[in-house]
Image (tube, helix red, strand yellow):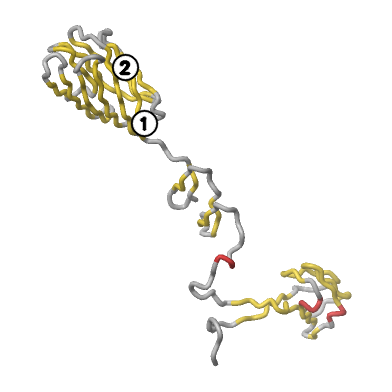
Amino acid sequence: MAYIGNVPAEKYTALTQQTFSSPTGTSFTLSQAVTNPVDIDLYIDNVKQNPASYSVSGTSLTTSTISSPSTMYCIFNGRATETVNPPDDSVGLSQIASATDGNLISFDASGNPAYVATGNDGQVLTSAGAGAAPAFEAILTNAKAVSSSYNVATASGTQDVTGFGFNPRFVIGFGSIEGTDSTFMGWTEVGVLDRSTAEDGATGNSYAYGSFPVGVVTQSGTKAAGVVSSISDGIRITWTKTGSPTGTLQLYLLGYA
C-alpha cells in the first residue's frame, strides 16, 4: 500500500485503561482528565455502562451507588498510549514548546532536559564541569596594563603598584628614566623566576639580571633594582639601590592572572 508523506512506523498502540480497586460509593478519581461522559467507556462487572448513568468533570467520576462489584474499570476513548518514536529529522521548530528568548536547553543532574537561564549582554556561556549546569557569566579579565613611577633616588624600600583587579601571576615590565636613555625591560613569574635587561644611559652599556625583573642603571655602578611579590590587586616592588642613582623611573607593567 502506498503512502503520502512519511511511512507509518510499525508499532502497536493500546487504549489507556484504568482499573478501580475495591470500588464502592459514588465518587471516584480518574487518572486522566476528561470533559464528557463519552470520553470514557465505564465497565462494572464487565458490563458497559450507559454514559447517561454517570458524569465526569476533569478527573472526577460520579456514578450511582455501587455496592462492591467484583470489577470496575474504564477505557479512555481517543487517548492511545503510543510506543512510536518520531522519525529522525522529523521534529521542527513548530513542534517545540515556546520558551524565553535567549534560553538554552541543557540537561539537569537527573539527565532531564532543563533550561539554562538567559544571561546578560556581554556574558559568555561557561561550563561548571560534569554534573552541573552551564551558566552565562561575565568574561574574566585576565590581563591588565598599569603604569606607575618611582624616584630611584629614594632610599631602598617598597612600592605597591595596584589597579590590576587580580593578583598577577606573570608580569612584563619596561620603563625609562625621564629625560635620559636609561631603559629596562624585564619579566617575572611572581615568586618563581625573574629576568631583566637594563641599558646604562650614560655609557650605552647593557646589563642582564637574573634576579631582578625591574631595574635601571643611571650610570656605571649606579642603579636601582626591584624584586616583585604579589599583593591584593597588584604587586609589591622591593627596591634596592646601589650608589646614588637619580631620576624618575616611568614604569609600564602588563600583568596576567
Q: Which residue shows up at 16% across the image and 20% down it?
A: 199
Q: Which residue is mark 2?
A: 149
Q: Which residue shows up at 53% across the image and 51% down it?
A: 116
Q: Position of residue 45 (x, y in %)?
A: 79, 83
Q: Residue furthest front?
A: 179
Crowdedness near tag 1: few (<14), some (14–19) or many (≥20) residues, C-alpha within 10 Å:
some
Q: Which quadrant of the figure contains the N terminus? A: bottom right
Q: Position of residue 118 (x, y in %)?
A: 55, 48
Label number found at residue 128: none
Which residue type does callout 1 highlight?
Lys
The quadrant where residue 224 appears? top left
The quadrant where residue 165 appears? top left
Which is more N-terminal, label 2 or label 1? 1
Residue 240 vertical placement versus 60 (above, below): above
Q: Secondary structure at mark 1?
A: strand
**Can residue 128 be seen in the rendering of this structure?**
no
Residue 143 vertical placement versus 111 (above, below): above
* Depth check, front residue: 236 or 196: 196
Label number found at residue 144: 1
Q: Secondary structure at mark 2?
A: strand
Give the side of residue 103 with respect to residue 76, left or right: left
* Depth check, front residue: 85 or 122: 122
Residue 248 vertical placement versus 4 (above, below): above
